Image (cartoon, helix red, strand yellow):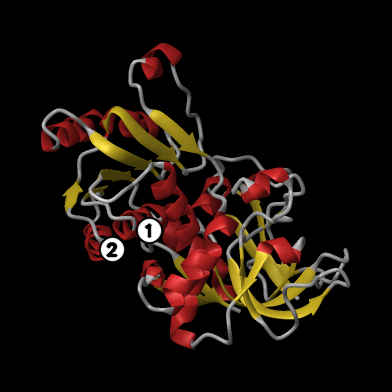
């Protein structure tokens, strides 16, 4: 079997890998139907996040179960399943509180850009669809595996409610699906911060009412101007840089809610500055498994179409081009077909 491996900055290879197999009674092995490149994959790809040698890549996936371990009870061979980027037993205290991405047995999936994937803790990680979905729905189902689940968590953690004024910082796939999620949760005014026409168009399709192209201090000033000096009720930080986090916090009203789901790189807070903002902060790796059943239902009922974030489709063996296209911002998100 061939799979995707990152060797160093901008050095992606599609090469021979060991065939996945059942290693623990709680494992499942699935044949990947669709996978993709995530914006977070670009951090190590660009050399901004160190790796300790060749690193198998990929953590977004959907596919058909081929084999299960002896202890697996909730999924079976032949079922179409979607799973999170973080495995979970769904029974530990962290899982029961709804934070499956902090499961005490958690492992991070990192080999999904391949035709076959072993999924640990299959019962608590995988969710099966009622039957085999139609081909046209599969990209949207793949999106639930991470980017939609993360965008949904961003909106949830930022306390988006009916009538809220919402700001979304970041116009990548997660930010765009944060817009979609905020719309689904009843956000009334949804301001997407973007300077790219193609992404602005999709943001509006997903529910954005306003677009702000300014960044940093200028972006904050524009938000305050639009909200009569008050700031937004809810701000979703979907990038992970110091500038984006500062912009998010300063765009929120006093007592507002800020979520942060962009993997932080070089982000630091000054306690005394944060203290006087009075903002609520919540973030981290999204507990996608908490939301999967609801998000899958929304996709299957065609109430949402998150798969529209995939604007480039390539065969899996052309994965290196998928990374280049996203790195060069020629694509929002690249879909890969084994």
Task: Name the residue rendered at 37%, 53% in the picture.
Answer: 178
Where disc 1 sits, the SS reads: helix
Q: Residues within 10 Å of mark 2 (few under 14, many from 20)?
A: many
Q: From the viewer's perspective, is 142 left or right of 251?
A: right
Quarter that holds the N terminus: bottom right
Q: How many marks?
A: 2
Relative to residue 98, is residue 120 depicted above or below? Answer: below
Q: Position of residue 171 (x, y in %)?
A: 33, 52
Q: Residues within 10 Å of mark 1 (few under 14, many from 20)?
A: many
Task: Name the residue rendered at 88%, 72% in the picture.
Answer: 70
Quarter that holds the C terminus: bottom right
Of label 1 and label 2, which has the lower sequence position? 1
Q: Do callouts 1 and 2 mark residues in contact (Cβ within 8 Å)?
A: yes
Residue that numbered label 1 is attached to:
177
Residue that numbered label 2 is attached to:
206
Seen from the viewer's position, the closer of residues 98 and 240 is 98
């Amino acid at each position: 079997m061939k799979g995707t491996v990152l060797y160093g900055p901008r050095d992606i290879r599609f090469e021979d890998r060991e065939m996945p197999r059942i290693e623990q009674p709680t494992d499942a092995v699935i044949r990947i139907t669709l996978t993709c490149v995530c914006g977070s994959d670009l951090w190590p790809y660009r050399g901004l996040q160190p790796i300790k040698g060749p690193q198998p890549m990929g953590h977004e996936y959907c596919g058909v179960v081929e084999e299960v371990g002896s202890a697996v009870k909730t999924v079976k061979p032949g079922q179409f399943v979607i799973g999170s980027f973080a495995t979970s037993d769904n029974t530990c205290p962290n899982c029961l509180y709804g934070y499956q991405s902090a499961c005490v047995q958690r492992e991070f999936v990192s080999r999904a850009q391949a035709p076959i994937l072993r999924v640990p803790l299959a019962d608590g990680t995988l969710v099966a669809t009622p039957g085999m979905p139609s081909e046209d729905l599969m990209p949207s189902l793949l999106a639930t595996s991470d980017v939609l689940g993360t965008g949904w968590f961003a909106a949830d953690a930022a306390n988006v409610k009916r009538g809220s004024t919402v700001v979304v910082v970041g116009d990548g796939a997660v930010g765009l699906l944060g817009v979609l999620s905020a719309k689904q949760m009843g956000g009334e005014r949804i301001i997407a911060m973007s300077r790219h026409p193609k992404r602005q168009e999709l943001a509006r399709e997903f529910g954005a009412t306003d677009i702000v192209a300014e960044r940093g201090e200028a972006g904050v000033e524009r938000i305050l101007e639009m909200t009569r000096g008050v700031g937004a009720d809810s701000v979703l930080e979907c990038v992970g840089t110091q500038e984006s986090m500062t912009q998010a916090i300063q765009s929120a009203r006093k007592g507002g809610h800020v979520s942060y789901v962009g993997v932080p790189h070089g982000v630091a807070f000054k306690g005394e500055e944060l203290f006087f903002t009075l903002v609520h902060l919540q973030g981290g790796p999204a507990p996608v498994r908490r939301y999967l059943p609801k998000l899958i239902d929304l996709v299957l009922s065609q109430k949402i179409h998150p798969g529209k974030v995939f604007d480039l489709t390539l065969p899996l063996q052309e994965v290196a081009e998928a990374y280049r296209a996203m790195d060069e911002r020629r694509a929002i998100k690249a879909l890969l077909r084994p």
